[in-house]
Amino acid sequence: MNDRTLGTPKTTAAPEETTTPETTTAPETSAVPEGATAPETAAPEKTATPEGATAPGMAARAGSRPGGGSAGRELLPTATPRRTWAAVRESLRPHRGAAAGGFAVMVAATAIGLLTQPLLGRVVDLVAERRPPGALTEPVVLLVVVAVTQGLATALGLSLVSRLGETMLARLRERFVDRALRLPLEQLERAGSGDLTARVTADVSRVAEAVRTALPELARSLLTIVLTLAALAVLDWRFLAAALVAVPVQLHTARWYVRRAVPLYAGQRVAAGEMQQQLLDTIGGAATVRAFRLEREHAGKAAGRSRAALDLTMRGVGLVLRFYSRLHIAEYAGLAAVLLAGLLLVRGGSASLGTATAAALYFHSLFGPVNSALVLMDDAQVAAAGLARLVGVTDLPVPEPPPTPPTSETRAASEGATSQVGTAPEERAASRGAMSEAPAASRAVTSQPPAAEGVVAAEADVAVEIVGLGHAYEPGRPVLRDVDLRLARGERVALIGASGAGKTTLAKLVAGVHTPATGSVRLPVPERDALVPGPGTTRPVVALVTQETHVFAGPLAEDLRLAGPDATDEELRAALARVGALGWAEALPEGLLTVVGEGGHRLTAAQVQQLALARLVLADPPIAVLDEATAEAGSAGARVLERSAERAIEGRTALIVAHRLTQAATADRVVVMDGGRIVESGHHDELRAAGGPYAALWKAWSQARSELPPAPAHDSEALSGPASGPLLTP
Amino acid sequence: MGRSGRAVLGRAVKGQWRGVAFGSALGMAHQAGEALVPVLIGVVVDQAIARGDLGALLRWLAALAVVYLALSFGFRFGARAGERAAEQAAHALRVALVRRVLDPGGGAGNGRPPGALTSIATEDARRAGAVNMALMSAVSALAGLLVGAVALLRVSVPLGLTVLAGTPVLLWLGHLLSKPLEHRSEAEQERAAHASGVAADLVAGLRVLKGIGAEAAAVARYRRTSRDSLAATLRATRAEALQNGVVLALTGGFIAVVALVGGRLAAQGDISLGQLVSAVGLALFLLGPLETFSWVNAEFAQGRASAARIAEVLAAPPAVVPGGRPLPVPVRGAVRLRGVTYGGLRDLDLDVAAGDTLGVAATDPADAAALLRCLGRRSDPDSGTVELDGVPLRDLSPADLRTAILVAAHDADLFAGTLRANVTAGLRDDAGTPHGGDVTVVEGAAGVPIPDAPRPAAEAAADPGRAMEAAADLGRAMEAAAADEVARALPDGLDSLVGEHGRSLSGGQRQRVALARALAADRPVLVLHDPTTAVDAVTEARIAAGIRDLRRGRTTILVTTSPALLAIADHVVLLDRGRITGSAPHADLLRDDITYRTAVLA
């Protein structure tokens, strides 16, 4: 028998759940993510907008998570500039040849293009020397040759540079998605999903935009500038000296601009994100806005956000335009200097009129590249910031490599680690005490299912073993204390309790979403289940279905195949049929090939949840955790979903968080939680007879369903009145 | 649609005509200046460099300085005016769109998901507004083109004609050669964008993926998408690179032609050397304005498409047409349906006396939804009438109606802000207008909007007595909805932020807060749809009692199959296959009606 120990941290040196992310294996990744340094500087409003989350200092505390207490935001790490460059160099290494080739072609193309001006100067000289018009043919033909060669070389060079950039970008985004999807959910919950979404959308597209347009253009501009200056020097070094008059002004302008632009654009993105969020809030909730007559207030809010975004945009425009104004000064200074140098050199006889003309034309042709290079620097900076946020994630260590079943030694080791996790010695002692003393609740655990009777038999047939489990999202606000629970293989346990009793937290800990603060969750895996069924896929030991749903964009069959990549169409149909979804699925316009999800066919809440259950069937885990998986569908839909859930967990060990007691009544065992503790455990009938909390819950639940209504005084009064009560007019 | 799209564009421009006119005037100065720079370089070559005249050089450099000053100034303030006009037009369209979407008459959504509507209000509004900037650029470019043309023709008519005829031909050739390439690259870029969509989708569903251990399958799927997308992108970039090369070659060839014609003219003594230099410079300059024209064309095409989408929303017919009759004062709250046929409802008759609590148990959720739509007047029935105190809803304006009837949806949205702001959202002052003041109040001094200004606080300053009363009302509603527990569980109580759509709350918490909001709104008629689907049995019982006590004497309609709630109703009707098939107190129906029993108990 092998064990898969969940919830025991790999690093034994984490006595307390600290707030620093795992960065031990990423030496150059900045250990403290942006925003984590100032968790208390709460922004006025929590913005989980993509942009909002990107801004440093915007990382505010999130509201309370569904599981209980509130948690401080802790964004995913961002790589340092040095590490970012190193990552770029690393990913460039396999393409060194292509990079060198592309660069060489671009240099050649630009150099060829710069022959144009001297050739035009040659035309001027020929005219000045009063040569016959026929003499012009030669430089003109050469001009055409230069144009065609430059065009071809540029096309080749650009294509090579783009290919390189795009290939690197594709590898980067694949690595990013790979790492992002493997992030521990716990870390993701701390960071908020907005952070990751912002990175995978806004940052990737920013970097892509840069690679697609800014990078080739910047390369071309910089090459043109450098080579033009070289060409000016070839004409006469004094032309170069004159042209360089403009450089200090340009450099100063560029620095001036970047200093102001970076914070301004950051603010602009935040404002745009806030506007977007407000519009989504208002438009998405339009029906509610109308029902409560909040039209004016919401229109006002949306207009206010839009106006704020407009103001910041205009400030940005103003800045860019001032930037150009300053560049105009530089242009004028340089042009005047070059013309002056031309005059002096021609007068002194050290340059021909044609050379002076070529110099002036060179400088005039520099305007474009210089302007675009300076502007593109800005884009490049934005892209670099995005890149740093991507590298920050790709550099995260890969979590555990699970497929090989752990040996008994690793179990022992991890159990050792488990006991070290306890926060304080006395608490640890307390949890040990809980273990050994086995309070009433957990005695019911072992006594109830017949399979878990004897110690040996229990070991073999235990699917979930929870010992001394405790958890707190915030220090000092424990949501779960001293929970001991053992699920026999194939047992269905319903978890009951008021909101905030810790049901969801317990479910998440069992599903491995959170690392427990104290105690451990063990999911002993028998050999047959540890077998890897198909190539490249591992059958999960435990699956979690919550009321949080998502339909993956694309054909319905593809959505299902995420859970069973090798499933045949027949298997997909069987899974749908099992949860009672085959009927509507086949009735879709194109059956299982109908595109669903974002931008596709819209499914009802109940259908979406059935889809989630069908995925559970396809993933086929031995243990299933359902967290109010039937809650969002309304009461009529809930019953349909309950049947679907029932079918989906057939043959599995199941932990079901339920608020509808029908699910409790049909479960093998009911576990009642209150205030983070298990207060009762046993079969429905047993607990109902026991007269404890469950009996009270059941009373409330069934009273409403019984034939005896609570019958408060006014009810009967109202009924007796002839005018009251709905009249049925046939 | 085409005409109304054009009307939207027309309004966008007309509303900003001052900005566009001012920007155009300054933009013309800029373009004229740009055209004069190569002319002046030529003059300097002729008058100063060729003659070695330093005095002349300084004079002409001073002239060049004046030109630079004008072009720099014109560009800076012209472009600013143009951008402002574009942004303001976009803002105006955005505000109009939001107003239309929120219009009490409804009908603007037309089944569009909120994301699509939001994108119309952001991206399409921006593109339609950008037409102002394009228009201003077009006028400016035209000025540059004219100045350049005049300067060229004054140098030499044949050379001027060569350049003036050549530049459009050159651009046309470039366009012709690159058109198939462009076409291909657009299609392929669309496919490339697909990869980013798939990634965002997978990340959005990350919890679901992790729940079933499908990370590896998802990564494999993304890798395939990414590779496909890369292949498409590479084809597109090759096409683009080729296009760039072709344009470069054509431009170079054109310069060679100008050099040939100009050189021959200069050699024959028809033009000076400086004029030759000017001509070459002007030829290069003229490509700018002409390229601007094709850019403007593209902007207008985009703007028209966006304007059409905006017009579709703005011009969408309202779902319900407001009637002219005023709301009865005071609203007693008697609701009557006569022969209502809508959706699955068949000739439905129903009476709710003022002050009664009615339970409606529907065997088909779709019937319940149809009934709710009619009661809230989100739609009018196909036939039959719904009346409030004897007045057909059709004769009332939906806005007025909603001050009397509140239909609280099962999945009602919460809004970003504090818990308190959410619950008090429906509170009204005596004037019958919602709190929150006018549009302009929302903005702070620094142009930074204040999220959820604490309205009860502002009220407290005005009238402490009423504020205390409001606080007590709020407390009662919170308690009745068992939302007081939610507030206690949050770190900052009522002042805790709930995130956009209240996402930082659990489903059960959200539902109770939404119910508290509906109860706090205190409408004469309250229709609650399945308000307790996500709460536990004990809480449900508490909520049922809370609703009963708080709404005593006020008309309340409970559309639900929850027995706990139906038990508090004075009377319950069973809605089966679009008709009412049973009508009695809950206990009686439960005892006598099998359909009811199966619908309600499970």
Image (tube, coloured by chain):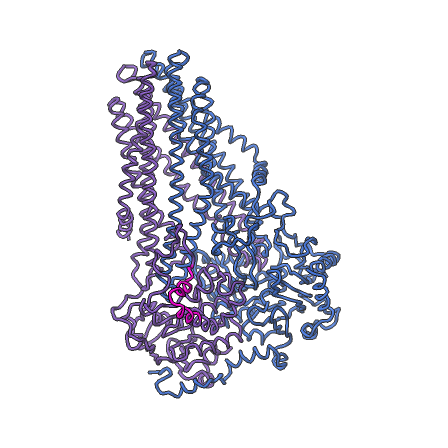
Chain colours: A blue, B purple
Identify the residue at horizontal 62%, vertical 62% (top origin).
A476
Q: Is residue A724 in the magenta section?
A: no
Work out whether residue B330 or residue A13 is closer to the camera in this orientation and state it: B330
Left or right: A527 as drawn, with respect to B95: right
Work out whether residue A498 or residue A120 is closer to the camera in this orientation and state it: A498
Work out whether residue B242 or residue B451 is closer to the camera in this orientation and state it: B451
Tell me if I can see residue B279 in this picture: no
Whether residue B46 is situated above or below residue B181 in the rendered picture: above
- Region in magenta: B452-471
Q: Is residue B466 in the magenta section?
A: yes
Residue A641 in picture, x, y percent from top left: 51, 69
Left or right: A668 as drawn, with respect to A345: right
Magenta residues, dominant SS class = helix
Left or right: B177 as drawn, with respect to A269: left
Residue B585 in picture, x, y percent from top left: 43, 84
Left or right: A421 as drawn, with respect to A248: right
Residue A557 in picture, x, y percent from top left: 50, 58
Residue A665 in picture, x, y percent from top left: 58, 76
